[in-house]
Structures are given as structure tokens and as C-alpha cells.
């Protein structure tokens, strides 16, 4: 099943751009994901299980970096294919 997720990262720090850019750059290294970024959020789409596997890894990497951060996500299930 394909799934789409709209995700926003809010680093609780005055220097908020580097962690956001690093997270998006890491998402773009996965060829199986479709990644679309705009000024407010990033949309990612892919096979459901793989998408959440990648998100688990990459959100953990982000949380392991210095400073506190918040992720806000909206998940849309798409069906077969």
C-alpha cells in the first residue's frame, strides 16, 4: 500500500535551518521515496512499511542531535500500488 505523509520539523532553537535541511537531505537519499518540499512542510510518499521504517530511522537521527525538536505529521493512506 502506498502512503503519503506531510511532515514538518520544528527545532526549538534559534538556529533552526540546519537541522531541517539535514533531515530533508537525508530523506532525499532514498530513491524509493518521492520527496516534495515547500516553504511549510515536506511531503513524502512511498510503500507504507518502508516509509515508516525510514521515518523511524531518520527521526531518531534527528532527535539524537543536540537540541529539542518537534515533528508534526499528517498521514494519508493511498491504497494498493
Image (cartoon, grey):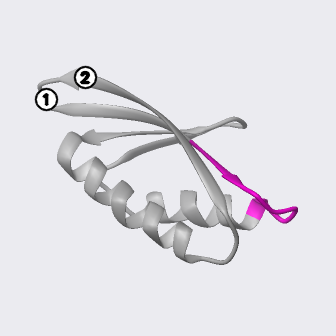
* Label number found at residue 60: none
* 17 relative position to 26: left or right: right
Tell me if 50 is positioned left or right of 9 in this view: left
Position above or below: 69 against 79: below
Judging by the rendered image, the residue that carries numbered circle 2 is 78
Name the residue rendered at 28%, 32% in the picture.
3
Q: Residues within 10 Å of mark 2 (few under 14, many from 20)?
A: some
- Which residue shows up at 72% across the image and 37% down it? 39
In which quadrant of the rendered view does residue 1 lie? top left
Q: Which residue is mark 1?
A: 81
In the rendered structure, which segment of residues is drawn in magenta?
8-17
Q: Nearer the viewer, residue 72 or 31?
A: 72
Q: Position of residue 17 (x, y in %)?
A: 77, 60
Residue at the left extreme of this rendering:
80
SS label for mark 2: strand
Image quadrant for the C terminus? top left
Residue 67's place in the image compared with 52, above or below, is below
Query: Residue at horizontal 61%, vertical 67%?
Result: 22
Identify the secondary structure beneath mark 1.
loop
In the rendered image, the vertical position of residue 49 relative to residue 79, given as above or below: below
Q: CA distance from mark 1 to mark 2?
A: 8 Å
Q: Are marks 1 and 2 in contact (CB under 8 Å)?
A: yes
Q: Is residue 32 above or below residue 46?
A: below
The residue depicted at 29 percent of the width and 50 percent of the height is 52
Amino acid at each position: 500500500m502506498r502512503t503519503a505523509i506531510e511532515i514538518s520539523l520544528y527545532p526549538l532553537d534559534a538556529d533552526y535551518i540546519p537541522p531541517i535541511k539535514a533531515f530533508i537531505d537525508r530523506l532525499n537519499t532514498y530513491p524509493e521515496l518521492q520527496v516534495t518540499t515547500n516553504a511549510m512542510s515536506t511531503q513524502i510518499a512511498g510503500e507504507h512499511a518502508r516509509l515508516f521504517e525510514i521515518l523511524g530511522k531518520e527521526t531518531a537521527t534527528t532527535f539524537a542531535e543536540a537540541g529539542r525538536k518537534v515533528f508534526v505529521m499528517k498521514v494519508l493512506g493511498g491504497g494498493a500500488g
